[in-house]
Amino acid sequence: MKKIGALLTAFALSTAVTMAANTVEAANPTCILMKFTDDTRFDKIESAASLSDLVMEKLLMTGKFNLKETRVIDARLEALLYDEKTRELQGVQRAMRYGDYNAMFEGPGFSEAKAQSIATASVGQKISPGSTAHIGQMPGAEYLIQGTIINLGVGDWWDDKAAAVAYAVGQASGLMASAGGSAMAATPLGLLGSLSIKRTGIGVQSDLRIIKASTGEVVWTKRVVGIGDQKQFGIGFIKVGSDELNANLYSKAMDKAAQNIVDALVKDLDAQKLFLK
Amino acid sequence: MSTSISAYAGLIEDNAVVSVMDFGTHPGAAACEVAWANAEGTTSEYVITKLINDGKMIVVDKEDVRSVLVANNIRTKGLIDPDSARVIGDLLRCRYLIYGNVNDVSASETGTNVLGPIGGGVNIHTVKSHVIARIMDVASGNIIMAAKGEGVSKSSLTEVNTLKAGIKVGTVTVTQESVHNALQKAAYNAVDILTERLYGKKKNKK
């Protein structure tokens, strides 16, 4: 009797967990991850595809999204969405055929409300609603998620992260000028010379945008920086660590960029700055 | 985070029937000094081995129908589209597909160096790999869960230099063995994380 009771309890719990999970799934927006793009000169190494994989995994971990796998999009539709020149050409061809350039300049192609491409669209702009609706319709997706890599490497676009480099070096200098530093100078370690900290790294700057499939409207976008770095400590002629850039730093930067962008999205969802559903 | 994991636990049944596709890669996934011949093919083999050893899911081999899939231009490597997944699921009679990419294989070197060319040092060569695996319901095209696994393989080189000569103990270059060691660990780690997210944490048997 006790065994049957235990079995029934386990069954009930298992059913409850599954039902709870299905309820959570039903409340979540259904999304498709579109092809990510890369605006840097390193686009041949497919950083965009790598970032897409990382973002996908982190989005699923939040438990706030249902993701559908992406269908193959035909070349014509892909060109309409991603190629700014294709969109411009459509309007120009018609104008040249009919000699109606007024219609072109006053048409949707020059409207600020219309995005030039999916990779450059900002909040409030619309991306070819017919195309986005078609992409979202078959798998029943309500939103399309698309990202772009803007910068890769080192630069001013690191924003406040660059200040951290100066702070680390300043900290080391400050240590030597402090009472602690003076105390160290009096020991055998003091014979080695001053302490130096060298920080090297690679940064990735990326955008993520969420597009309502039925209307093509961009409802959310954010730009973040992810940095993969390392430190080399030097005391006189002793050096610990490495100051050489390597692929490991690149993968760390990509992972941090993906994490930062998903964190920003969840933060806005939780703060109700963004409503999906 | 724990709430999210528990919310997903139970979305897949025990003894779910799955098939593992060939894992893909990106052109820039590996640094030029890393030798990783056939890494994509072996990664899926590592995933299959781990799944079978874990015993949580029933793994169906796609090799018997590979020729049919190839003949019909059905994608079996890297990211699988829902239409291809449905055909594969019908042929193999499996409900789920596990697929994904080797996200990166990187090599780095760090260590301690004293007096440079006339002193010596210890350098640690590290090969690190990440594999991202997804599981899809072939009927709906839903990505049920994903997991990123990490694998690390280290080797060391100790150098003692003098003005006349030096000695080295350890490996200088990254070997294919260390690459595959890292890939295997990453694949195993991905399966462990995926299983935990789908089924919950393993309970210790008393």
Image (cartoon, rainbow, N blue to C red):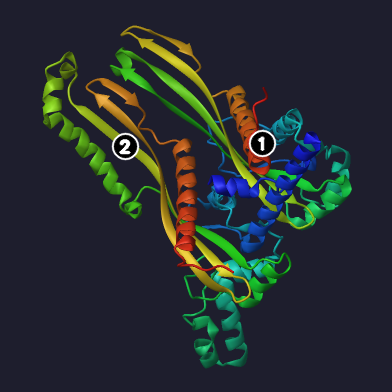
- A100 to A161, vertically: above or below: below
Say which of A153 and A212 sits in front.
A212
Q: Is residue A258 left or right of residue A10?
A: left
Instruction: Tell me the quarter of the image containing the N terminus of chain A.
Output: top right
* Percent x, y of residue B198: 67, 43
User: Is label 2 in a helix, a strand or a loop?
Assistant: strand
Residue B38 percent coordinates (x, y): 68, 33
For image coordinates 60% across by 44% down, the residue present is B26
- In the image, B168: left or right of B135? left
Measured along the vertical axis of the image, is residue A10 above or below residue B85? above
Compared across the picture, whether B156 is left or right of A188 comes to right
Q: Quadrant of residue A135?
A: bottom right
Residue identifier under label 2: A199
Disc ID at residue B191: 1
Q: Residue furthest top?
A: B164
The chain identifier of the residue carrying mark 2 reads: A
Q: Is residue A22 visible?
A: yes
Query: In the depicted view, which residue is nearer to us: A151 or A269?
Result: A269
Label 1 secondary element = helix
Which residue is depicted at the point 75% across and 35% down? B56
Name the residue: 64% across, 27% down.
B204
Residue B163's mark? none
Chain assignment, label 1 = B
